[in-house]
Image (cartoon, rainbow, N blue to C red):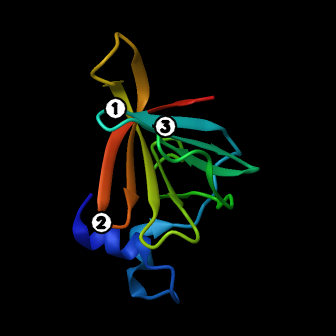
Amino acid sequence: MSASLASKIGNSSSPSSDTNVISQTTPNAEEFIARGTEPFWNVTVNRRGIVYSTPDVRNRRYPYTAPLTAMGRPADLVRVYRLNGQPSGVLVIKKVDSCSDGMSDNVYPYDATLILGNQVLEGCAQRR
């Protein structure tokens, strides 16, 4: 994701002409779990909330926000969740042919990018 797009996503202030980049269309409610290794992290997403965990941080909760989807693309292709209350907090889940966590033989149907402030974490995701 480009720095320009990340700044547009992370900025939840009033709409501007840049809103053409992302549509506010909400796909059907779905549950996801995203996870990464080195460092280990996971995020669960459902209507009750978005929960971030690491071995050191247990269950940091954010309110559920309907995902943004890519304008003109199927809703299942990409979802962008804002982590309200976390400056520059964004979870991007994108459909891919396969995603490997690098530590197991598991293959996942989604790629995940978690942005927390200045930290960018990459991993994989699946529907729960």
Question: Disc 1 to disc 3, how far (Cα)?
Answer: 11 Å
Q: Quadrant of the C terminus?
A: top right
Marked residue nearer the N-terminal end (1 or 2): 1
Q: Residue at x 49, y 37 (%)?
A: 34
Relative image position of residue 36 (x, y in whole percent) = 38, 35
Q: Nearer the viewer, mark 3 or mark 2?
A: 2
Q: Residue at x 46, y 64 (%)?
A: 89
- In the rendered structure, which amino acid carries the disc numbered 1? Thr
Question: Disc 1 to disc 2, how far (Cα)?
Answer: 18 Å
- In the rendered structure, which amino acid carries the disc numbered 3? Ala
Relative image position of residue 61 (x, y in whole percent) = 64, 55
62 and 40: which one is in front? 40
- In the image: residue 12, left or right of residue 102: right
Residue ID for mark 1: 37
- In the image: residue 119, left or right of residue 13: left
* Residue 96 visible in rendering: yes
- In the rendered structure, which amino acid carries the disc numbered 2? Asn
Residue ID for mark 2: 118
Q: Nearer the viewer, mark 1 or mark 3?
A: 1
Q: Secondary structure at mark 1?
A: loop
Q: Quadrant of the N terminus?
A: bottom left
Residue ID for mark 3: 34
Q: Secondary structure at mark 2?
A: loop
Relative image position of residue 2 (x, y in whole percent) = 23, 63
Marked residue nearer the N-terminal end (3 or 2): 3
32 and 121: which one is in front? 121
* Residue 71 visible in rendering: no
Instruction: Tell me the crowding category of disc 3: few under 14, some 14 to 19, or many 20 or more residues within 10 angstroms, Cα based.
Output: many
